[in-house]
Image (cartoon, rainbow, N blue to C red):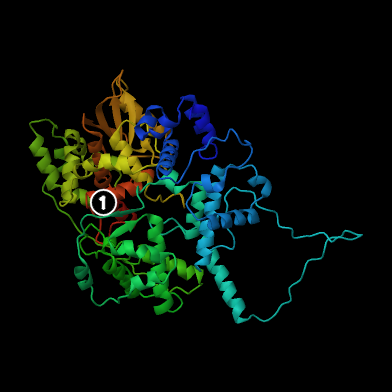
Amino acid sequence: MDADALARSLEGLLPSELIKNLKAQCIDQECFMGLTEQTLKLFDFPMGHIILIIKLIGRIEDGKQVLVDHSSTNNHQTPDKSTHDLHTGSADELDDGHDILRQHVSAKYLSTLTEYELSPLREICLRWKRMSDSGFPCTAKPYFPGVPLKELQQNAIVSGADNEPRPKRRTPVTHTTEGDTQRRSLRSERAQLMRPAESSDSDHSDLDDDANDIGQENLESAGARWGSRRYKVPALPHNQEALKAMSPSLPAYNVEEILLGDNISKKFVPDLKEGFLFEEKTRKLLFRVIVKGVCDKFTRENNPTKDIKEGIAKSITVAFPQFQKLINVPGKMPWSHIYGNNTGHVANIVKRLQSASNAKQPKSKKVQKKKQTSSTTCTIDIAALALVMPDRVHRMEILDGMSKSFELRQADRSKGLSITELITKYPHLLSYKGEVIAAEFKLMFPNAEDMPVKIQPLIPKVIEHFQDPKINPALKDDTLKAFMLMASSLPHSIRRKTIALPQEDDLVIRVKLGVDIASFVDERRADKKKAVQPYLIAVQGALSEDVLQFFLVLDSFPMELGRIPFIRGIDWVLKACCVFNVHYPASWNQFFRFCQTCLYKVFISGEDDVPPSSSQLYTRLMSL
């Protein structure tokens, strides 16, 4: 099959723009079947198109897809859906999907779509039908974002001489029956499940949104951020017996029996018993079924106590130990990311159930924290120490003086002093190319681990297994590319139901050799609407993109770091955020929290814990 015939056979399977690009490269069928991701990158294909091609080649090799030249048939006919359907499903299910589409979507609009464009809409219908058949609360009809629906004929015209509109039917007011109450409760529950939730680290999207996501961005073809649909963790901190022995007073529930009682969840039980973990959407489904099953049987009006909620979390980890947290946090249980201190997956699901059933939530008393006042004394003359010349001769004197005055800086940080005020009072924080900041971080967190050493071996695996079409595949720095892939897979706290792309210029700004760094920092600080700091400045060669040296910018103070690896520069940025007590960059907040809790293993306070999304990302990385 030559290039022209291949282009005709790909109609309806791939976007027309992508087919034109393949045809322009004179790619025939034999060449098409031999395409790889590396080859397509050489031709500058977008990552989204690369994923579509690789997926299609895989279906052809598995025998699920056949390429047929339609030159002998009418070009305006729609290809046979059983041959060209992009999604798996039986013939009866595909027919049901078509029927549901015809019931709700405008026929004129459907006639303009290709089989490739119809596929995600059909998948929405199938997902909606499966949830409706299983009895799970969902909307009365599928939701198709941005798709014209059939107009409801509310005012039908009466066939007669006058052709006047039929009067609206009035519903008599009667006493509310028990059936009416149940129906209203079900409608309210469905509406609450479809309601946009506040930004949360876990379980903030519902199943209907999961189905709608297929129409906007096919998770299998364009997302696939978690790689395969299931994976295993090589080593677990605790076995079932050890988990069962922890907190023996908590109630225990047969979560396996609850999952087996659900038509959708029961098919995952065999893999769960073998130690497999699933992607985020499946995990949410399983947890919701478990929490709802326990609340329906053991609670009243979906108001479980803290012991019941923590008992659910413990029962999940005892039945399926792969859900436990891989990072041991002092004072925290291995299931604290599932439920701990009224946070985590279980707490969020319970709030959903309470909102759906209009249950009265018990009000908790606010306990005011007592302000701790402590006086700090220091024998070091801070003013005299600030005047010592930061050269090689006085290096040990300065480091020793900064160590002995650590308690004073801790008190100043608790008062909320700004970066400029701290640097003005302790100018040696900028000395010795970040060595003083590193020593200060070590004094603050003596048990902190070295992030670059832990993450460096995982960077090639992240690039191989994590994919996101929004991330520029032309990024030459593998470390930055891997960090952006991981950051894009974490939830974002600013925009609900979406994951905002991490911004490169929130971390590093690239300038050419010869630029006045001090003037550049002042100009950027004046022009920037939203201050982002600390950040890095990478000075590149005049004729090349090689980084000659890095600067760490703190307010208006650029501190030279020298020629260091980019990953070490990010290490300085995070340490500077902790030392100067400033917020992480907004678009990188969740990723820095992941680095802080899972890689450095640093916890700011006694109540600080690993966020559930960070725990899941760390588990995924350990399984690579």
Above or below residue 159? Residue 621 is: above
Q: Looking at the picture, how far across and down is residue 612, in whole percent?
A: 33, 57
Q: Is residue 429 left or right of residue 251?
A: left
Q: Looking at the picture, how far across and down is residue 235, in whole percent?
A: 20, 56
Task: Name the one closer to the observer, 143 or 511.
Answer: 143
**Label 1: element kind:** loop
Residue 601 appears in view: yes
Q: Is residue 172 left or right of residue 45?
A: right
Q: Looking at the picture, how far across and down is residue 389, in whole percent?
A: 13, 31
Above or below residue 612? Residue 20 is: above
Q: Residue furthest front?
A: 72
Residue 416 appears in view: no
Q: Is residue 412 left or right of residue 54?
A: left
The image quarter containing residue 337 is bottom left
Residue at x-position 34% and y-position 74%: 308
Q: Residue furthest right?
A: 161
Q: Looking at the picture, how far across and down is residue 40, in whole percent?
A: 39, 31
Q: Residues within 10 Å of mark 1 (few under 14, many from 20)?
A: few
Q: Is residue 163 left or right of residue 107?
A: right
Task: Name the one closer to the observer, 603 or 3.
Answer: 3
For disc 1, the marked residue is 623
Q: How many marks?
A: 1
Task: Name the one closer to the observer, 336 or 75.
Answer: 75
Residue at x-position 40% and y-position 39%: 54
Task: Name the one closer to the observer, 536 or 335.
Answer: 335
Q: Amino acid at mark 1?
A: Ser
